[in-house]
Amino acid sequence: MASRTGPRRLHRLISAAVGALALAAGLLTATAPPASAAALTQVTGFGSNPGNLAMYAYAPTGLASGRPLVVALHGCSQSASDYHGHAGWAQYADQWGFAVVYPQTSSANNALSCFRWFDPAQSTRGNGEALSVKQMVDKALALYGSDPGRVYVTGLSAGGGMAADLLADYPDVFAGGAVDSGIPAQCATSSTAASGCQYNDQGLTPRQWGDKVRGSYPGWSGPWPRVAIWQGTADTTVKPVNGTELRDQWTDVWGIGQTASATLSLSGGTTLSEYDDAAGRPAVELYSIAGMAHGLAVDPGSGTGQCGATGTYYLDTICSTYRTGLFWGLDGSAPGGGTTGLPAPSGLGVTGTTDTTASLSWSAVAGAASYAVYRGSTRVGSATGTAYTDTGLAAGSAYAYTVAAVDSTGAEGARSAAVTATTTGFRPTCHTDNNYNQVAAGRAHQSGGYAYANGSNQSMGLWNLYTTHTLEETSAGYFVIADSGCPA
């Protein structure tokens, strides 16, 4: 029986030093993965892969284009196939229609096969494992025709820590995320500091936690991903305070405070606290599971909302995958819950572009009072007719659009398949900052302690806070040093 406060209805790591952390010692497959209609396959040739990761993917047979994409990161000593077989994502990929990418690390990167969430060379925008995952997303979007405005990332333990980092690094890529028994974004910046994040309260204010996210992609002001946080109260590997710190971090980023808008009692001893955005939809969810130790919450069975298979660190409590999928709107509902019976508009197309505008049109939906227009995951406008022109765009840039019908009560229906509009021309831009921030912003990369401009690969000197350069972006993603004067 659900109980709640608030007016709305119920809706739908980490190990660092070799052998030093107990995060995932023994995270091994305990039961065989269930059979699937499609197969988990390895994908190669997805980019430069600076993080030395392997890419595996699952796409239901006959998957249509314009569907969501989920990235799922395993825990230490696990593998892509292990996570695929236990977490339940394949079940909902078949049921709701989306593709899943499973990045896989190895003992060549970390002795316990942990994603390196604690290493800035691996966990920051444009670098290492984080960039490898971004390259996997780009590959999957091309392979499956997935909707670039509905890309999500989730992870367990070390995978949860890396998922939090990815949400901070690439808010322009991920519309939502889930951190299962994981760590706040950019909590540690060295292997020696990792255990402190796991076991101790860091004593930071919500603002300080939020600054770690804002500093991961300087200049980005939103939209921010919707984040689900899963934490067991009996977790001795990643202490429950991490769930609170994650809550503080992402509510501060959203600017919505740390007082729950609603509290729900769910199955499996689970308490859900919701934190609403300005539109009254949950932007952050914190699931606290009484008595659960370290692991991923699953609930095997054939009932509605049951999923997964039990095993080492796959714990029989509640199906976290089902609840997370509803929160993201993978079932066709609006993100954060709520849906209407109106179907997705068909025939969405680009009718024209300039260097700063993109014009769209689509087919009418019976019963629609208006239409909501989305650029990526951001609602940018509405129209009473079946055409819209988006303005204020950057020249020579690609933008993904979807449209949803809205009924007379203001409830949105399912979003259309995505289309991409590319504006004409290219407008060079100049960026003056220290080398560390240039790398963090994705304008440069570092190797061996030195920074290099992306594209031109010009040496910028030491990768630190004390060396400053001006970089000019002369074409998309191509930067040159312009210290003597930047004409842009």
Image: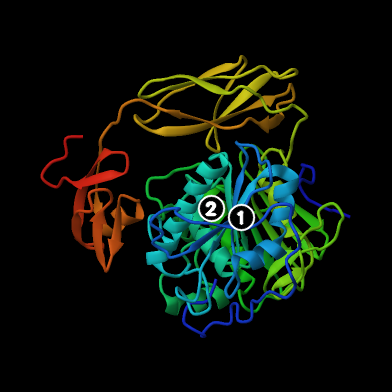
Q: Residue at x 70, y 54 (%)?
A: 90
Report whether residue 329 is seen: no
Which image quadrant for residue 238?
bottom right
Residue indicated by mark 2: 252
Report whether residue 199 is seen: yes
Kindly identify the amino acid type of the residue bearing the numbered disc 1.
Gln
Asked if residue 347 is positioned above or below residue 250 in the image, the reply reads above
Dot 2 lies on which element?
Answer: helix
Asked if residue 406 is positioned above or below residue 152 in the image, the reply reads above
- 419 relative position to 346: left or right: left
Q: Position of residue 285 (x, y in %)?
A: 66, 54
Question: Sequence order check: which comes first, mark 1 or mark 2?
Answer: 2
Q: CA distance from mark 1 to mark 2?
A: 8 Å
Q: Position of residue 161 (x, y in %)?
A: 54, 65
Q: How many marks?
A: 2
Query: Do the residues under discs 1 and 2 have CB atoms within 8 angstroms?
Result: yes
- 253 relative position to 414: left or right: left
From this viewpoint, which residue is outermost toward the left? 484
Disc 2 crowd, CA 10 A, few/some/many (<14, 14-19, 20+): many
Q: How is the image coloured?
A: rainbow
Dot 1 lies on which element?
Answer: loop
Q: Nearer the viewer, residue 194 or 221?
A: 194
Q: Please give the label number shown on residue 222.
A: none
Kindly identify the amino acid type of the residue bearing the numbered disc 2.
Asp
From this viewpoint, which residue is outermost toward the bottom? 19
Residue indicated by mark 1: 258
Q: Position of residue 287 (x, y in %)?
A: 70, 60
Asked if residue 184 is positioned above or below residue 453 in the image, the reply reads below
